Amino acid sequence: MKLSTIRIVFLVGMLLVFGCLNKKKAQLIDVAEQKTQLEIYDFDGLEPILKKEDNTVYVINFWATWCAPCVKELPYFEDLYASYKHKNVEVILVSLDFPHQYESKLKPFIKEHDLKSKIVVLDDVDSNSWIPRVNKDWSGSIPATIIYNKNKRQFYEQSFTYNELEEALKKFLN
């Protein structure tokens, strides 16, 4: 190969490597009329969302479209979002759906269920490393939820009814 061809191959290779390393956040999908964009994170990109120290109470639910208990409780998170969105409460739904199904399953699901809460996608195959970083006692099963503010944090590896979810949230409100 010519020297200039080698340089081009090297530069393209470096761009690919650095592009893969910098995948912490990427806009992926416009979900139809909702004008919603899913943010895709690896765990290093998601982790700051799990550790904010402001005056907001965060309700973060780990779920997937293929998880029946997750789908059953999603309306309760949506109702909580609607009831508390003006009270310094942010509901974030962290999808663990498989990357090859974003277009075929996740996007239609969001549209069909008219989800309004913030939705992010965790695309990180190394679950053995990030699950204990979410919570040291988490088995990895879903649904799982974290509720936290700057002073307090609680992890729940369970399904919720609306009343249970609201009661858990109320422990964090002033």
Image: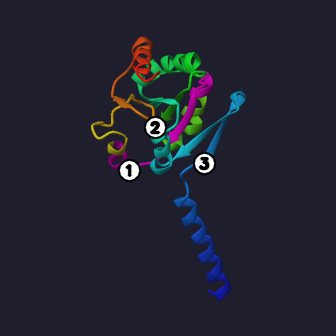
Position of residue 148 in the picture relative to residue 17 (left or right): left
Horizontal and vertical percent for residue 133?
A: 35, 45
Q: Do the numbered discs 2 and 1 sit on residues whose CB atoms are within 8 Å? A: no
Q: Residues within 10 Å of mark 3 (few under 14, many from 20)?
A: some
Q: Is residue 149 above or below residue 27?
A: above
Residue 67's mark?
none
Q: Is residue 8 shown in magenta?
A: no
Horizontal and vertical percent for residue 5?
A: 66, 82
Q: Residue furthest top?
A: 163
Under tag 3, what secondary structure?
strand
Disc nearer the start of the sequence (2/1)? 2
Task: Say which amino acid is labelled 2.
Answer: Leu
The residue tagged 1 is 126
Q: Do the numbered discs 3 and 1 sit on residues whose CB atoms are within 8 Å? A: no
Under tag 1, what secondary structure?
loop
Q: Is residue 123 shown in magenta?
A: yes
Horizontal and vertical percent for residue 153?
A: 38, 32
Task: Say which amino acid is labelled 3.
Answer: Ala
Under tag 2, what secondary structure?
loop
The residue tagged 3 is 26
Residue at image point 62% right, 71% down: 12
Q: Residue furthest front?
A: 174
Task: Say which amino acid is labelled 1.
Answer: Asp
Distance from disc 3 to disc 1, alpha carbons, whole Å, reads 19 Å
Mark 2 vs mark 3: in front: 3
Disc nearer the start of the sequence (3/1)? 3
The residue tagged 2 is 96
Span colored in magenta: 109-131
